[in-house]
Image (cartoon, rainbow, N blue to C red):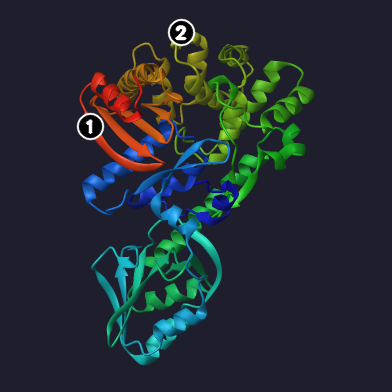
Amino acid sequence: MVVPLAAVEGALVGTEPLLLRAGRVALACTWRVRFNAGAERLVGFFDALKRIFGGDKEPPFMTVRRADGSVVAMDRRTVEFLNSKAPAPSEESLDRLFAGASQARVIAGGVVDGKATGNDSLLEVTALADLAELRNLLRIGQSGRHCMCYGDHGIEVSGPEGVRATLGLHHGSSIRWDPEWASDAALVDGHRLLEWLAARGVEGPLRNLEADRRRQEEAAKAAERWRRGAPPCLAAIWDELSPRADAGFAMFMPDGGGGASGRKTPPYVSRALGALKDAHPDERDQILALLGWLGAGAGPWSGFPGYEAVAETLLSQYRPASVVAAVEAGEASPLQLRGAARILFRLVDDRETVPPVVRERIRVGLADAPDNLASFDSAFADAPSGKAKELREARERAGVRRRMAQDLVQALAPGNDRAQAGGYGASAEKGQRTVSLFVEEDHSYHVIRFEDRKNAGDRRVRSASEAIAEARKWLGST
């Protein structure tokens, strides 16, 4: 099965920031990830959730091969949405649902497969006039999209015969009716519905919506600051850097990693670098321009807005030694020092690559960003302490796991069609079968088997030899 990428991009919406639904939100971008360790980590994450919380009898995720031959991990519900043959949302179906209805309940929590996940009833509506008003507040407009979470609340509608359906309310902006509808439907006036609920004591949805809007406004301001901070020479190719709005957030969607990592270079890179070279013939000036842009980011080095990856990708085309030399010259501004700290943290494994004088200059630039300073010290300080020491120990543990993953892929490569490693995992493919091996924190191994891109089971083993034997047995390789 091949899912058109353009169809996925236009249909999936992810707006819920809460960790409660982090897994579903994380999948908002998995259709861009080649099936490497990144996808394997998502696979392992969902499988862990299934073991801990129970849940679907069917596998909660599957692999999908794209037309270019790459494979992505996608949760089953998203695939079902993309393949749904159900009718589109309609006012007529809602009219039928509410015709003769005797009660509606608002239930805390999301809705899965048409059933509420929670039991806490926040509001019961029984008066016919109130039911009619609720129906009117559920007028719908545009459809065809799919939110990447289970929603905030359920609206259960009952008649004399019992429960008829439970609608999922998503962020005060859309509703979902599984399995009746093929997609979510946008509410004509979701804010008015939430005000109606708040007036009857259900204030949480309105508070959440207003908080989401404030976050979106702040994110939009940050994105505009980022755009204004870009090197002026990039203005002519700005559209090629793919700025767009997604669920209220301005986002860039670069197509891959930078040349320094050995991955496929995004098509915008050569044009952007060409524009930088035309404006700044000296490589040092090119690097400083990009460092200032990166330093003007939102602040975090992880969990940052996706559009900031553009500056990181461009900087990754330069040798780390060139970045160090640009800072060492002593002309870097505070923003450029912040950008240098971030990109060197990403690119440099050997702290001796960064001379002490450069380290100290960068540390001064990070004085008002303690979290980033701790991260920098974890990589470059001679004797880190406190949080920096904890972070270094975590980095060292992560390094061990990455080396273990590299050992796995070398063992799996012979006799198979393809084998690759990344992060803490490795995967191999032969014919219609794929196996993924993930190195856990306790150095045990999680072996996940797929056949024809569907999950075929998993197993935890204690040693690399067991994991490799399990993988070879599944693939039929020697």
Name the spot of residue 446 as percent of width and height, x first: 27, 31
Q: Secondary structure at mark 2?
A: helix
Which of pointers 1 and 2 lies earlier in the amino acid sequence? Answer: 2
Callout 2 amino acid: Glu
Can the viewer see residue 364 in this picture?
A: no
Name the spot of residue 355 as percent of width and height, x first: 50, 8
Q: Secondary structure at mark 1?
A: strand
- At label 1, counting other C-alpha atoms closer than 10 Å, the crowd grade (few under 14, some 14-19, many 20 or more) is some
Q: CA distance from mark 1 to mark 2?
A: 38 Å
Q: Residue at x 26, y 20 (%)?
A: 464
- The residue nearer to you, when weighing 101 against 453, is 453
Q: Residue at x 31, y 35 (%)?
A: 448
How many numbered markers are drawn? 2
**278 over 201 or under it: above or below:** above
Quadrant of the snapshot with the C terminus: top left
**248 over 279 or under it: above or below:** below
Q: Is residue 471 left or right of residue 251?
A: left
Occupied quadrant, residue 413 = top left
Q: Are marks 1 and 2 in contact (CB under 8 Å)?
A: no
- Closer to us: mark 1 or mark 2? 1
Can the viewer see residue 383 in this picture?
A: yes
- The residue nearer to you, when weighing 73 against 281, is 73
Callout 1 amino acid: Arg
**337 over 93 or under it: above or below:** above
Name the spot of residue 66 as percent of width and height, x first: 54, 41
Q: Residue at x 58, y 37 (%)?
A: 68
Q: Is residue 263 left or right of residue 289?
A: left
Name the spot of residue 279 as percent of width and height, x first: 78, 25
- The residue nearer to you, when weighing 200 against 26, is 26
The numbered dot on residue 352 is: 2
Residue identified by numbered label 1: 460
